[in-house]
Amino acid sequence: MKKMGGEWCLEKRSDSFRNPEQETLLETGCLSVIVLGASGDLAKKKTFPALFNLYRQGFLPSDEVHIFGYARTKISDDELRSRLHGYLVDEKSSSPQQSEDLSKFLQLIKYVSGSYDTEEGFKRLDEEISQHELSKNSNEGSSRRLFYLALPPSVYPSVCRMIWNCCMNKSDLGGWTRIVVEKPFGKDLESAENLSAQIGELFDEPQIYRIDHYLGKELVQNMLVLRFANRLFVPLWNRDNIDNVQIVFREDFGTEGRGGYFDEYGIIRDIIQNHLLQVLCLIAMEKPISLKPEHIRDEKVKVLQSVLPIKDDEVVLGQYEGYRDDPTVPDLSNTPTFANMILRIHNERWEGVPFILKAGKALNSRKAEIRIQFKDVPGDIFKCKKQGRNELVIRLQPSEAIYMKLTVKQPGLDMSTVQSELDLSYGQRYQGVTIPEAYERLILDTIRGDQQHFVRRDELKAAWEIFTPLLHRIDDGEMKPIPYKSGSRGPAEADELLAKAGYLQTHGYIWIPPTL
């Protein structure tokens, strides 16, 4: 606390930006990773497995690191370890070395039970962390504390206040306290800004890591390298050569027991406003002056601020048949499980180029990909337009790949053409190389103090400014989702919108991942 104008006010405890390459020199204190919501699905399925993989790769040495789980559930250390065991290794395929690593890793985990809105539990948590720091001979204030909030956003404010009141480093001797918060970060502009203000009252921006796991995906992280390290693309990446850009997320299953949770948010809040919009930023941004996190995030914000208001006639919403059969979903739910929309960027590079964002559940396939479709060749002497245009396709999942669709001569005596591809399939090109899970990469970034792949507050605000008017019209019932059959492509109107945007479907060509 500090006194300002005669009143006592909260004083932020700063965490100045450090170059990750200097971390080993600057930060000698031990590391405590605290997973709040430790008994929940997110922690069990994503957070703890990522920590285990980092441990196995040597990024979390046992002589420096301790892991604390915190939740309301009253269980012992061993009970939490037992619950986690099956999520960390596959018993049928695990090696003796992996089993040994797992046994050692589980011993690093300590559990503390307590509520999220009272100090009693957090004081016990602080005592346990302090004992660990003392056992590692860390000077008070030199240790590092990373709080991962695997929790619903509704409890973020109270949890952050409890951390600030009870669990911060006591002085600044090179250590830090950082928090990781998961999406959804708010439901619209107002709620997101309120949440940001409440957390920002306690923590400085360099201490806050708003995680979007799509930014940790290998092919998403490759976007900057692909764009700015290859001379080939520099003159092509603009409205003179690119006809349209499509960013697609498809799942072949429905809400599967999460209907009540999903119905609060819908597909736009769940996928498009964050994951797909972040991908759009990396495709559309200008070249940053360096790879420093702030320079990259500055360019992403400029893109978001250049997006025009979304037009209702450039949006198609859908809801799969059977969605309302879930007993946790209201009978008259207006929540879309499918959305296809066009975003338009008003700047010199992208004026007139539609960015088509599509996401849906219970569709006929599971994939996430980017399709950058180039314009037709002027004066086409081969009459091959019907076969399709050049496309750069970046397959995010599954079967990660980058391939370029090209028109080539059909082998034989005739001068006929056919579509083929230049193909970089990761499974074939990088055999034996394990692609890290997104959460592994992002948790390691938080430890290193690298915020490049996290969402800044003004970036979050600009994203909600784009979608809030549309979301409010949907919430108010002004726009209705179109029913579509489970296992289909989605509403037929979505394909009509694609054609209206200028996307030209390739007929007779199917990309087949190469076999090893």
Image (tube, helix red, strand yellow):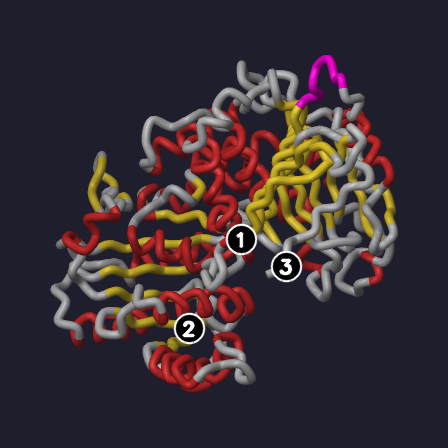
Identify the mark at residue 114; answer none if there is no mark: 2
Which residue bears the numbered disc 3? Answer: 515
Please tell me which residue is depicted at 75% across the width and 49% down the height of the picture.
337
Would residue 348 be seen by someone viewing this image from the given angle? yes
Circles 1 and 3: CB distance less than 8 Å? no
Q: Residue at x 52, y 41 (%)?
A: 192
Residue 35 magenta-drawn? no
Query: Which is nearer the N-term, disc 3 or disc 2?
Result: 2
From the viewer's perspective, is the residue at label 2 or at label 1 nearer? Answer: 1
Residue 480's place in the image compared with 385, above or below, is below
- Element assignment for label 1: helix
Callout 3 secondary element: loop
Q: In whole angstroms, how far apart are the C-alphas of marks 3 and 2?
A: 51 Å
Magenta portion: prevailing SS class: loop
Mark 1 Cα shell of 10 Å, populated few (<14), some (14-19), many (≥20): some
Q: CA distance from mark 1 to mark 3?
A: 11 Å
Query: In front here: 213 or 245?
Result: 245
Q: Nearer the viewer, mark 3 or mark 2?
A: 3
Magenta-drawn segment: 375-381
Q: For residue 44, which numbered disc appears in the image?
A: none
Q: Is there a contact, CB below 8 Å, between mark 3 and mark 2?
A: no
**Residue 306, located in which quarter of the rendered image?**
top right
Instruction: Give the residue pinned by disc 1.
Output: 426
Above or below, 38 relative to 151: below
Mark 2 surroundings: few (<14), some (14-19) or many (≥20) residues within 10 A: some
Q: Amino acid at mark 3?
A: Thr
Q: Closest to the observer: 360 or 417?
A: 417
Q: Residue at x 37, y 79 (%)?
A: 101
Callout 2 amino acid: Gly
